[in-house]
Amino acid sequence: MSLKRYMVKVCAIASGSNGNCYYIGTETEAVLVDAGISRRQIMKRMKELRLDISRVKAVFISHEHSDHIRGLRVLCDMHGIDAYLTKETLNKAHRNYHPQTAHVFKAGDTVQAGAFKVHAFAKQHDAVDPCSFRIEVEGMSIGVMTDIGAACQNVKAHLQQCDVVFLESNYDEQLLEDGPYPYYLKQRVKSDHGHLSNRQAVELVEQLSGTSLSTIFLSHISADNNRVELAQKAFEHLNERYTILPTNRYAPSEIVSVGEEQLSLNF
């Protein structure tokens, strides 16, 4: 009799305007969404979590802003990892971020990367061709949904299918209003092509989460216009329904293991 594991490990390597990187992995394989911090920092933080870079089969890039793509070239070229991004994102990204080999997908495509079925879908953000992702593996569905100005039908439809989601909770509306940003930047942040506020993120979960959703990582929390405690407070009335965890721009989050362990008889 042998124990077969069907556990999926999920965590944020980094999350914030200074860099984003999200990890989804099984016992043998993994993918990353975004590589917005340096390869050195990705390696350092993965080592802290005892995650093996050799398991990473692919990196999927959501859009061309440097906090999502900065470490892509060095990470992929040094470790032989496949890079996936849209043609428009690749063309718009700074040449310094281009890996030697890049695989191109389109919004609406489903990409098979090892055991992972990655669904890419268009979202509203001020980038040339922004996408979010829902990753299926071992019967689980994990969403990475940040940099969303307004929750379009794509976001809503994919959120309903998630067991775990990295959900943007970028700003507190009052802090943004009273904060140091110039007027034009405040307008950009709260526009339909900017970011989700704490309130908007809560409303999205209240209205649309599927019955399988168990864990929400509060993600891309602004250093200037939000506080972790404010984001957590906004969600506190949902604590009995979900495990709600903050992410960090300077350190990895805790690892959440989702799925089941099953016994298998071998004769």
Image (cartoon, rainbow, N blue to C red):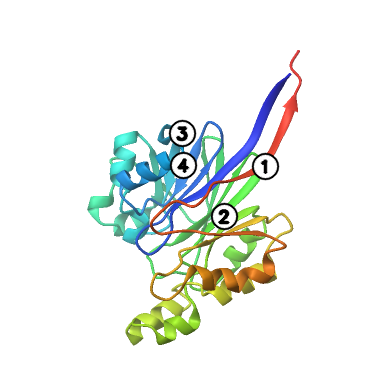
Q: Is residue 77 depicted above or below 216 in this figure? A: above
Which of disc 4 and disc 2 is earlier in sequence? 4
Residue type, numbered disc 3:
Arg
What kind of element bears circle 2?
Answer: strand
Q: Within 10 angstroms of label 3, few (less than 14), some, or many (20 or more) residues?
A: some
- Residue at the (52%, 70%) spot, across then down: 229
Question: Residue under circle 4?
Answer: 49
Question: Residue under circle 3?
Answer: 55
Question: Residue under circle 2?
Answer: 143
| Separation of marks 3 and 1 at Cα, in angstroms | 19 Å
What kind of element bears circle 4?
Answer: loop
Which of disc 3 and disc 4 is earlier in sequence? 4
Total marks placed: 4
- Residue at the (67%, 28%) spot, across then down: 4
Which of disc 3 and disc 2 is earlier in sequence? 3
What kind of element bears circle 1?
Answer: strand
Q: Within 10 angstroms of label 4, few (less than 14), some, or many (20 or more) residues?
A: some
Residue type, numbered disc 4:
Leu
Residue 103 visible? The answer is: no
